[in-house]
Amino acid sequence: MRPFRRRGALRHARLQQVLAIAAIATAVALPVVLLSVGGGVSQHELSDLENAGYQIVVSASGEHGISDGHALTQRILAIPSVAAVSPVLSVAVDLFAGTGGATPLLAEGVIPGQFLATLGAAEADLFPRPLPLGDPTDAIHFANGSYDGPATEDVLVSSPLADADHIAVGTTVLLSPGANRSLGVSYTVTGIFGVAPTALGPTGAFAAVLPLSDLQLLTGYATGSGGTLIDAVDSIEVSLAGAAETEPAVLDQVRAEIQALVPYYGVSSLDQEAQQLQQASSVLTGFYLALSSVALIVGLLFLALVLVRRVESGRRAIGIRRALGLPRSWIAGGILEDGLVLAAAGSVIGVAGGYLIVAGLARWGSAAVAEAARLAVFVPSTLALLAAAVVVLSLVASAAAVRAALRVEITEALR
Amino acid sequence: MTATVGAPRIELSQVERTYGRAGAEQVHALRGVDLTIAPGEYLSVEGPSGCGKTTLLNLLGLLDAPTSGEVRWDGRSVGSRTDRERARLRLTGVGFIFQRFYLLPTLTAFENVELPMRALRTPRAERQRRATALLEEVGLGPRQRAYPHQLSGGEEQRVAVARALANRPGLLLADEPTGELDSQNATGVMELLDRVRADRDATLVVVTHNPEVAARAGRHLALLDGRISADRRGA
């Protein structure tokens, strides 16, 4: 009977250990996931800003909120130190290739001659040079806002889209503002561009680039009701030259000049955007750490509870050890060691678990979640710091158990 | 082999030990006990249940402290020693053998015997040599790797004896060492205790109800209601 009872007690103790390790592992996995994904997304966005080929961006609240895109481009181009000005309109459209069905994609309308000059080096390498979209100025078709000039009807498509729909240079496709073939306009594919795998996820990999005026007409952002000229774009990217590119004071002066042209639009430098992004990232990191702290505290409370329970159920063993003359430091050391081993095991499993969760999200998560998970960055020093913090906190969690153990009366425990 | 700390001279003067709050609930385990135990003595302590035998043993072994009076080891008051000093003295100078063995269930027989030596930071090779020798001495050489739940009661008590001898103490305290054993095992354990006491010239104090066990001692102490009612010498 006795052996069975002891084995049962050992199983019980093992279950407590497993639960304590699981609690700590869960508490560690949460910050691993939050910090790696959050940090990765922020880092990626910052990297995008740092690698951009423009220094100033004009934007407006609301979708396609900037009017007079072509005219504004010319006025900004006239400012000294401005090297290139690229208005961009992004609209979701459908593409029909051959007799196939509609393929949704993101179309970007640009002024061909300005577009490449505002791309970062890595991004610009993905496009053919010069951009084979006919009129580099997009002025012929735009025709001072009448849109009466001849359209080039050229379009570039992304390589994933070309592969999926068997499109090659020279193929004729229909672009439509909706999934209705009859609304489509015929375009000739004049080039194929690459897609950076981390910059565009699966949803953004199907893309097309065409002259700004073509996309404005196709999607209704050329003129409004009654034929009023809108000439709408989402943003205008401004690339600088000379000292303005590197010297903050000159850059700020150019930014002020642009702002004076468009007082009701937002004009910000990428440095400002980067600062704002970093601030937002810091706030998010703080929030993640606060959430993680709650999880860690719960995990460590559980550890403390398990250790105290082990002391309570092991009072006789403690009494025996003390009766034999083992010093208090030996008893305390044993409990701290138990706590450390459980915390270290939980930390290792938590870090590995967090990594697996992120990997799982990258593979099986919804499109947006998967894209964010793919950007996750596991910083070894952060993970080591996290594990070290858990180990140190485990010593604090062990304190209650140590105190309980050192208060065990030998004669009481052996009674 | 000699004791790490030689057999001590122990003196108790006017020792009282009470438990619980003052009033009706208070229990007087020992009342005004005066006792001197010379080094190397073999002493049996007898008496009815609740007469204070185990309390006396706990005081002798520094597991407990008197409520009043004084316990002296080699002339020095135990009360003047710190908790750490008393623990050190237990570790090096006292070997306990309990009625219910009190082996640590998660350790093997070998590890149980090795434990007091580990606490004393005895070198590993010396620990292993001595633990093996002690287990062979108590007839458990082949059972070193067994856990307590795999041993019989007699075997467990022999492991407890080996553990009590691990640091070569000068004082062996046995509380009903045969209380949970059949007569054959009881005889074996007592013969073992007689032998190791004689070999090591240690003091042995045995608390027992068993007249046969008590008869082996050279001095017989009887307790009644917390007081020494008889103290006679001779087998």
Image (tube, coloured by chain):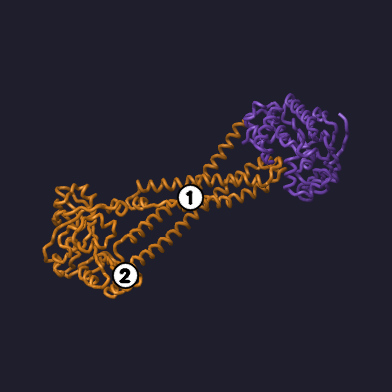
Chain colours: A orange, B purple
Indicate the quadrant containing the C terminus of chain B: top left, top right, bottom left or bottom right. top right
Q: Locate residue A117: give its quadrant.
A: bottom left
| B167 lies above or below A373 | above
Within 10 Å of the Cα at label 2, are there few (<14), some (14-19), or many (20+) other Cα atoms?
few
Amino acid type, label 1? Val
The x and y percentages for residue A214 are 17, 61
Q: Confirm whether residue A138 shows in the render.
A: yes
Q: Which residue is mark 1?
A: A28
| Distance Cα–Cα, label 1 vs label 2 | 48 Å
Q: Is residue A192 above or below residue B38?
A: below
Near mark 1 (Cα within 10 A), the count class, few <14, some 14-19 or many ≥20, is: many
Callout 2: residue from which chain?
A: A
Q: Is residue B190 left or right of residue B146?
A: right
Residue B107 lies in quadrant? top right
- Would you say B153 lies left or right of B17 here? left
Residue B159 vertical position relative to residue A148 in the rendered view, above or below: above
Image quadrant assignment for residue A176: bottom left
Q: Earlier in the sequence, mark 1 or mark 2?
A: 1
For label 2, the residue is A243
Foreground mark, 1 or 2?
Answer: 2
Chain letter of the residue beneath label 1 in the structure image: A
